Amino acid sequence: MELSKVAQRYPQTAYAGFTQSLQSEWQYISRCVAGVEEFLQPVEDAIREYFLPAILQERADNIDDEFRTLLGHGVKQGGINVRNPTLTASRLFESSEAACAALVGCLLSDEALDLRAHAQCVRQASTETRKLRVEEESEFVKGLAAGAPKGLKRRLARVGKVGAWKTVTPSRLNGTLLLREEFFDNMRLSYGMRPHDLCERCDGCGAGFSVEHALSCKKGGLVCQRHDDARDEAGALCAMALTDSRVSYEPFIYYGKDNCANLETETAQPPSKNLAKDEARGDVAVHGLWEKGRTCILDIRITDTDAKSYQSSSSEKVLERCAKLKKDKYEQVCIERRRTFCPLVYSVDGMACKTARAFEKRVASKLATKMDRRYSEMVGFVRARMSLVVIRSNTLLLRGARVGRAFRPDIADAAAFNAMGGQREW
């Protein structure tokens, strides 16, 4: 209950504390004591009645058994890794029992312990338990998707590629900290729930304010700010992996006339009438990212894969199609100038296209070499940073102002001050 109170103001910290620390305490007991699951029912009741409603900003009555089972899954299987202790206790005990088989055998026979055999036994027990759990969770998700509406089916199809931001430890130093509104908004969006306290109409264009409209409305420049935030984050990670001098922003892809065959239609007009089409710029230029002595041009796009215009295609195909459009337009021009071109296309919930995933792996490899850290650790760090910068922008678009002026009374003369109920001394 105390952690649930913390979650009201610091939900990311409370969630990380639960999944990475507190939950491990009763999991340790489950591994050591047989038949403990019946005594863990009060823990599950507290999780379901207090903690989950605090994390999701949802009434406990609305968290049914099916939804609770989904939330108990791992992040890659659509859940948030808040396990049900009454269901996992017996499996944890069986896993520990199998992992200790070689050790117990040596103790009973009074023989020397074979460390290699013991390590292999532990590894095999852990792998088999994890495999069985993932298979069960995957089957459950497939069962949910079988008779689900299109929107839910699309979300379930990409659950394994959009949860990097959920698993990070909040840290101001590492740039992985989420504000209260950012955590709540994106946690609800990930399960198809409308965030609380949104306005009824868009203050930029006056249309009805739905989540889809908020993530795509271009009034007020918030969409451009989302793009620029992702650009700056990609550039910052490249500078961290290489050096600041190797990274520049808004580089020319081409300029002038007669650039490439696929640009003939754009440069057919005299320069005086076609100045805007005589040049194109990328988002970030990184020297030496893929090959020594060659510059890579990064071009970023963030798209809502659940928009009505994309309903006929899967989320993955939408991202690859957007990446292909950028490649068809700019890749040949970059090759002619001995450059590489890398489109970074993300969905609004953090799913990355193939080239974006390759970019993340390459930056992680450079970071692992430079900082002498494990590659797997750096991959998680880079993916989390890129996922966080995308989902932070969702709150910006949902709650940011799109109006170009302040809402103040239009006072024509001093007589209006009497109607305002008082005057203010300046």
Image: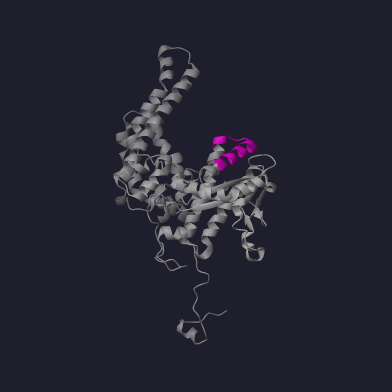
Specify the segment rendered in magenta. Answer: 358-376
Q: Is residue 95 visible?
A: yes
Nearer-the-camera pick, 156 or 191 = 156
Instruction: Give the dominant element type of the magenta stretch: helix, strand or loop.
Output: helix
The image's colouring method is: one colour
Left or right placement of residue 360 versus residue 197 in this view: right
Say if 418 sits above or below 350 in the image: below
Task: Examine the structure image and report whether residue 364 is included in the region drawn in magenta.
Answer: yes
Q: Position of residue 36 (x, y in %)?
A: 32, 32
Point 40% across, 27% down: residue: 128
Q: Position of residue 6 (x, y in %)?
A: 43, 50
Point 37% across, 48% down: residue: 52
Q: Position of residue 310 (x, y in %)?
A: 42, 52
The mark total stands at: 0
Nearer-the-camera pick, 200 or 13 = 200
Left or right placement of residue 182 versus residue 97 in this view: right
Task: Examine the structure image and report whether residue 356 is included in the region drawn in magenta.
Answer: no
Point 37% across, 41% down: residue: 72
Nearer-the-camera pick, 326 or 133 = 326
Nearer-the-camera pick, 12 or 401 = 401
Q: Quadrant of the C terminus?
A: bottom right
Q: Is residue 236 visible?
A: no
Q: Position of residue 47 (x, y in %)?
A: 35, 44
